[in-house]
Amino acid sequence: MTTANLLDFDLEGLAAFVETLGEKRFRATQLFRWIHQRGESDFDRMSDLAKSLREKLKTAARIEALPVITRNDSADGTIKWLFDVRDGNAVEAVFIPEDDRGTLCVSSQAGCAVGCRFCSTGHQGFSRNLTTGEIVAQLWFAEHFLRRHLKTSERVISNVVMMGMGEPLQNYSALVPALRTMLDDHGYGLSRRRVTVSTSGVVPMMDRLGQDCPVALAVSLHAPNDELRDNLVPLNRKYPLAELLDACNRYLEHAPRDFITFEYCMLDGVNDQPEHARQLIDLVRHHAGRGVSCKLNLIPFNPFPQSGLTRSPNTRVTAFAKLMSDAGIVTTVRKTRGDDIDAACGQLAGDVKDRTRVGERIALQRTVILKPVTSIAGTKET
Ligand code: SF4
């Protein structure tokens, strides 16, 4: 008999499941708390559940963790796990400790179909969407592992960023119950402001997320004009910048924060010139006559051989950040973490049984890539 994986359910879904067992809906709250707040997977140990319910659960349900293939610990405290998601696929999650927070970066797909030029995951192609249970299992495992590891009963993970492998908004139906579980006071009780969905710009799903489950939003921008963004983030051909920024403004009507975070990966000689900064300022300040309320996060590129791209020198990143800040746009440069275990941004690259022809696609893109810097910026940098 197939059993239900209870990690697949948000509280509402669990209540409906419990009803199918002939139990009252409120039992689901107790069960949900045992699973997510206490990390329990053995029904026999859920001592305040009626014995009759525990017996039913033992035959109808399971709490299925993802097998850990490897764990890597960085000298800076970052921890990366590689989880087995069957059929030759594996996904990664990364814990990043900081003084005032603990952030878990979570994957939403085995691979990714968007195929961004600068992203290791994008170069691996796409196998399949993760289930809600597989998304939640990354947090479930990491939170309770870390509590044991750090010998604390306090919550360790305060922030979740959906910035691991995959485009979360292309796995919308699994994503939303996972987010609800993260936010639920009987689950992880995370603040909406501390759960961030990162998207490359799936415009219709941004609108739906704003309605269904508004959380903080990060948009992978990476270019200040359509010509360049078409090449770096292929989804731009479907949802160009003007549509994307309109969607950002609509999202802000529902968002828990009053700004969108724009992610901008700094690529040497590609998108890091003063002219790009000027275009970006113009875009975010004047789009549709009112601009977009935003913060800009500049990300040092983590090179990998197939990309054909290199990291912008620090001096250029600093100069770019200064131009943006001088224009009144709050700009940060992301600290790289977990470099020694390949856990930094854009380096997550589990194992993907690719079902797309991403290699061919990206090779084709590379043949049409990127004008020389002189023709974009008008000045040549050294
Ligand atoms: S940056 Fe995000 S959307 Fe683009 S290929 Fe990588 S995982 Fe996919």
Image (tube, rainbow, N blue to C red):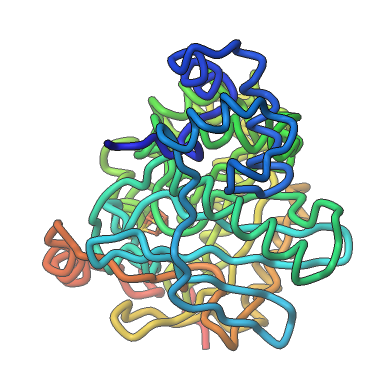
Q: Quadrant of residue 376?
A: bottom left
Task: Give left or right: position of 259 versus 350.
Answer: right
Quadrant housing the N terminus: top left
Q: Nearer the viewer, residue 79 or 208?
A: 79
Q: Quadrant of residue 375?
A: bottom left
| Image quadrant, ligand 1 | bottom left
Identify which residue is drawn at 81% across, 70% down: 150
Q: Is residue 122 above or below residue 56?
A: below
Q: Is residue 49 above or below residue 265?
A: above
Identify which residue is drawn at 44% across, 65% down: 67
Identify which residue is drawn at 47% across, 38% down: 58
Q: How many marks?
A: 0
Q: Nearer the viewer, residue 8 or 40?
A: 40
Q: Nearer the viewer, residue 236 or 196?
A: 196
Identify which residue is drawn at 78% across, 47% down: 328
Q: Residue 44: percent from the left, percent from the top?
A: 61, 43
Q: Residue 353: percent from the left, percent from the top?
A: 20, 65
Q: Residue 329: percent from the left, percent from the top?
A: 73, 48
Using the rendered image of the protein, determine whether residue 211 is visible from the camera's viewpoint: no
